[in-house]
Image (cartoon, rainbow, N blue to C red):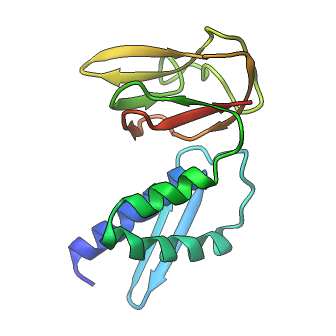
Amino acid sequence: MDIKELKDVAVELMDALKNRGLGEVELELDDVKIKIKSAPPAPVVPVAAAPAAVPVAAAAAPVAQGEAAPAAAAAEELPAGTPVKSPLVGTFYSSPAPDAPPFVLVGQKVKEGDTLFIIEAMKTMNEIKAPCDGTVVRILAQPGDMVEYNQTVVIIE
């Protein structure tokens, strides 16, 4: 396995961590062992590390054909509720400063207009507000993650 293939596999594993809310994933192939951990594991998805490795390996094959298949699979797994999408491309931050507590946590009740997260784009911090009252059921990004335009970041039920 050459360095480009290793890099591609590592990127796929990182995407799987983010999309599935996992805290850690490990893959061992012949003479190569890759282990990736996210900063804080997502508290809403209690998944064992061993069974999670099987979907990751299966998700690596469709990537060669295009990005649409993994994105469609991730969209199908989202819980019901109001999705809060990123209005622009940028970097996701869950708190106003690295040492500050996050704006919201999973299970927290929010009111319309409450700040949910920040998207930094071109050195500008954009506060994203709650579109409705409800409870945060899922946060789909980790601090420092790049988010795309119209990507679902939080789900409010």
Q: Residue at coordinates 40% horizontally, 76% vertically from top-left?
A: 61
Question: x, y (%) of residue 92?
Answer: 44, 30
Residue 3: where, in percent of width, then height? 22, 74
Could you say which is closer to the camera, residue 122 or residue 111?
111
Residue 26 vertical placement versus 81 (above, below): below
* Residue 113 in sight in this render: yes
Is residue 68 or residue 141 the one in the foreground? 68
- Which residue of the protein is positioned furthest toward the top in this rendering? 113
Residue 80 picture location, percent across and down: 71, 40
Q: Determine the residue located farthest toward the bottom in the rendered image.
A: 30
In this rendering, does residue 37 appear at all? Answer: no
Total count of labels: 0
Is 47 on the left-hand or right-hand side of 38?
A: right
Quadrant housing the N terminus? bottom left
Classify residue 75 as left or right of residue 66.
right
Q: Nearer the viewer, residue 117 or 102?
A: 117
Residue 140 versus residue 10 in the image, above or below = above
Q: Is residue 65 above or below residue 153?
A: below
Quadrant for the C terminus in the image: top right
Question: Relative to residue 70, is residue 147 depicted above or below?
Answer: above
Q: Residue at x 54, y 60 (%)?
A: 73
Q: Tell me what residue is drawn at x 40 percent, y 37 percent.
A: 147
Q: Quadrant of residue 63?
A: bottom left
**Residue found 67% across the figure and 74% down from its top:** 51
